[in-house]
Image (spheres, rainbow, N blue to C red):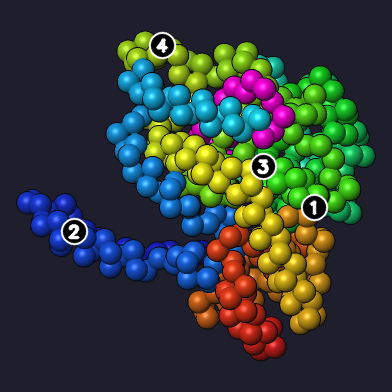
Amino acid sequence: MILNQTLHFEVVHMDEKGIPKEEVWNTVLDLKRKDISFGSGRIFGSMCTSPESIAVEVNRLFQESNLGNPGLYPGTMEIENRVLSMLGSLLSLDRPFGHVLSGGTEANITAMYRAKKKTGRKKVVFPRSAHFSVLKAINILDLDPVPIDLDDSFRMSLQDLEDKLTDDVALALCVAGSTELGAVDDVERISEICSGLPLHVDAAFGGFVLPFLKDLDMLPDHVSRWDFGVNGVSSLSIDPHKMGGSTIPAGCLIFREEYPLKYLSVDSPYLTSSKAYTLAGTRDSGAVAAAYAVMRYLGRDGYRKVVSNCMEETRYLLERLREVGLEPVLDPVMNIIAVHHNDPRKVQTRMEEQGFFISRVEVPPALRFVVMPHVTRAAIDEMLPVLENVLTSI
Ligand code: 0PR
């Protein structure tokens, strides 16, 4: 959504006396009605989707839990460990260490914070396709960015990496499922080139897609191994609140070895555990339980079905876009499509005026569609004629 204008909010003061619950509900529902729901079939540019109902229901049970003070919530803590353990088995790691955080941003910041503390260095190597949270982390942590160019297939250029890599690097970061195009870096080769350096894989989006594409035999040949099966991978982020079908906020940061956690620890003597490891103090726990519930409920087979449906609709949408002369920037590896257009911002704005929310890519200029589970055939069929009209009118 394009929201660059300043929003004007009604000034509201806290009432001296409370108001009846019904009145509270009415005002909340009035405001909620302004929001766009995934169920409307109008959102084509989001990496989140309607959570599975079991995730929503389970989340509600954990409103009091606080994983920031885990001694009081051993059950919730066990759930967090189970989430990590299940994800470990998905990502070729027997004994994962880490936490469920608020999302891919916090995971990237934490991975970079850990690298800075461990190595005492400041250089971070990352592809230009990395999510903007990497730049946030660089700003917050006062790191030195070393952006690596992309090759013709929009993956980190191995040549540029070799040219720019020095031995004073704190962390190399690569992406398994880039935000804009769904491109998967050649993690195996990157790991060889960066041998001995901490290597973080941002699979915030791809983590819940690539394993199931592999099961379905739908991974293109150029996608190498990208998870902990690659020896050099030291940490990885994967978000249940994106393709995991869970509630917001839930993104996991997983380390291969336990010792990295020590670089994150600070003393928290007055809490039930004497060390704290996460950036957040008080931590959402409902989303952790929700992630556990949805993973148990769907199982690998359920995720395969979700991914397979998304890919089917991705192929359908791409075919229809081609019919109106729009060509993909990249043959989609996963359920993200970007099609060349010289003025994507204008198309995006016009679509928004018609109540449809698509996304865009800046370089190269393109329209972007994320084919999440809520992007059904009916939703696509409703959106396409509107898009065609917009394209002919500009
Ligand atoms: N890494 C990658 C590869 C990502 O794609 C994203 C998020 C992140 C990290 C950051 O994750 P969090 O936003 O969970 O911290 N990509 C989406 C984006 O920026 C997030 C998003 C989700 C945006 C839903 C809009 C939306 O409706 O596009």
At 32% from the left and 20% from the top, the residue drawn is 72
Structural crowding at the residue carrying mark 4, measured as other residues with C-alpha within 10 Å and reported as few (<14), some (14–19) or many (≥20): few
> Where residue 207 is drawn, which disc sits there?
3
Choose mark 4 or mark 1, whichever is in front.
1
Structural crowding at the residue carrying mark 1, measured as other residues with C-alpha within 10 Å and reported as few (<14), some (14–19) or many (≥20): some
- In which quarter of the view is residue 77 placed? top left
The residue singled out by tag 1 in the image is: 218
The residue singled out by tag 2 in the image is: 24
The residue singled out by tag 4 in the image is: 274
Against 349, residue 174 (above or below) is above
- Is the CB of the residue bearing disc 4 within 8 angstroms of ligand 1? no
The three-letter amino acid code for the residue at tag 1 is: Met
Q: Earlier in the sequence, mark 4 or mark 1?
A: 1
Choose mark 3 or mark 2, whichever is in front.
3
Where residue 116 appears, x then y in whole percent?
65, 22
At 81% from the left and 72% from the top, the residue drawn is 327
At 85% from the left and 40% from the top, the residue drawn is 224
Q: How many marks?
A: 4
